[in-house]
């Protein structure tokens, strides 16, 4: 038996307790910011993919808010209810790595049947080459539109290779050479509904390196020239005089209520949009404005009647909050458009500020 001799410096370090090993780099986890970013990216891109699938099937397709988690790839395989139809999308340009889309085989059969003008209740329960080809075409168009949405959000060209579609018949015999079972991945799970035919889970799977790459691009605000021109930056209209408060207090301590005076809104023209946005222009978004809030007891609410005045926690000179799909994106002020209320945008939140409001 042979042994290596320790140097005096190593012996002294061990005796003094100063010998230490470097802490491992956390390569198998994502921080909260990265989770928020990939969740929002997945939400927008899959919403566009759902819109594309809706056009293909001529039936309404909806997805829920995504649930993001990190786990070993083998755990996903073990938890999967097979058979599963798995679509692999390799990024060709703009991003690195791959993206997997998994759905139940029965759902894929229904999608294929609807694509071939069926009634959504196919008698043939087997997933043949014909159904595989139809689903492959649907996935190709879905993920192509999803890549376009990602390119718009990341402000860079994102190209993908043609999707590879296969069927996992048995979870015990899954052979997938692109990702090893011990690799930590990011799973983004959605509940997808297709008319009255499908209501089940569909999931996206990204490698952690791809998620970190996407997060780095978002946080660094790295722009590229798309289609030989740069994306235009939205310009905020110059603010005019703010709305003057109209409520005053008389000598008896009562609040005098008057109608607010608003300025007329002039048409400022629309910003020119890049051509690659045309594919997602029909994606519906919920636009709402928060005027203010107030916390009341049940007694206070029951005492309200016609003519009652409720004071809000917003001053008259404070900007109003503008939300899109429940996410704060901008601030503005009230204006009048003919005889209707409107909102003039005075400030658009930066990407970092919007990420902070994702939760």
Image: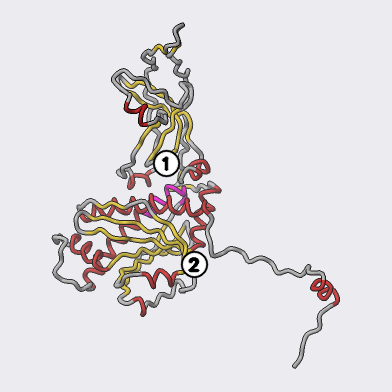
Magenta: main secondary structure: helix
Q: Nearer the viewer, residue 278 or 332?
A: 332
Q: Earlier in the sequence, mark 2 or mark 1?
A: 2
Q: Left or right of 41: which side holds 25?
A: right
The residue at which mark 1 appears reads as 327
Q: Residues within 10 Å of mark 1 (few under 14, many from 20)?
A: some
- Residue at 47 percent across and 62 percent down: it is 70
Q: Left or right of 236: which side holds 102?
A: left
Which residue is most to the bottom? 1
As helix, strand or loop, the secondary structure at mark 1 comes to: strand
Q: Is residue 20 above or below residue 34?
A: below
Query: Pointer 2 and pointer 1: residues touching (CB < 8 Å)?
Result: no
Q: Nearer the viewer, residue 172 or 344?
A: 172
Write down the region rendered in magenta: 146-156
As helix, strand or loop, the secondary structure at mark 2 comes to: strand
Q: Nearer the viewer, residue 281 or 183?
A: 183
Whole-number angstrom distance, CA of label 2 to CA of label 1? 29 Å
- Report x, y in % for residue 57: 21, 56
Residue 189 magenta-highlighted? no
The residue at which mark 2 appears reads as 184
């Amino acid at each position: 038996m042979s042994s290596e001799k320790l140097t005096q410096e190593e012996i002294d370090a061990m005796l003094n307790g100063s010998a230490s090993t470097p802490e491992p780099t956390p390569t198998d986890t994502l921080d909260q910011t990265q989770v928020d970013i990939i969740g929002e990216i997945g939400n927008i891109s899959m919403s566009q993919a759902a819109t594309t699938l809706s056009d293909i099937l001529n039936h309404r397709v909806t997805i829920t808010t995504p649930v993001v988690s990190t786990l070993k790839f083998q755990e996903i395989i073990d938890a999967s209810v097979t058979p599963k139809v798995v679509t692999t999308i390799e990024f060709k340009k703009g991003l690195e790595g791959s993206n997997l889309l998994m759905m139940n085989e029965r759902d894929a059969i229904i999608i294929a049947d609807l694509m071939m003008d069926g009634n959504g209740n196919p008698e043939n329960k087997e997933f043949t080459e014909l159904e595989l080809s139809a689903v492959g075409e649907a996935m190709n168009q879905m993920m192509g539109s999803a890549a376009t949405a990602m390119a718009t959000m990341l402000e860079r060209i994102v190209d993908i290779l043609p999707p590879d579609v296969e069927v996992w018949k048995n979870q015990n015999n899954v052979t997938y050479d692109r990702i090893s079972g011990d690799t930590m991945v990011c799973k983004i799970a959605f509940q997808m509904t297709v008319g009255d035919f499908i209501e089940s889970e569909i999931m996206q799977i990204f490698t952690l390196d791809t998620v970190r790459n996407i997060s780095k691009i978002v946080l660094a605000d790295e722009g590229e020239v798309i289609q030989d021109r740069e994306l235009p930056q939205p310009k905020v209209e110059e603010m005019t005089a703010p709305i003057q408060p109209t409520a005053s207090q008389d000598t008896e301590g009562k609040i005098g209520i008057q109608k607010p005076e608003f300025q007329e809104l002039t048409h400022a023209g629309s910003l020119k949009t890049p051509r690659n946005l045309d594919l997602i222009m029909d994606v519906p978004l919920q636009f709402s404005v928060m005027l203010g809030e107030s916390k009341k007891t049940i007694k206070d609410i029951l005492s309200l009647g016609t003519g009652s005045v409720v004071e809000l926690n917003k001053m008259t000179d404070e900007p109003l909050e503008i939300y899109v799909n429940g996410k704060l994106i901008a601030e503005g002020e009230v204006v009048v458009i003919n005889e209707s209320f409107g909102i003039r945008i005075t400030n658009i939140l930066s990407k970092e500020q919007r990420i902070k409001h994702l939760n």
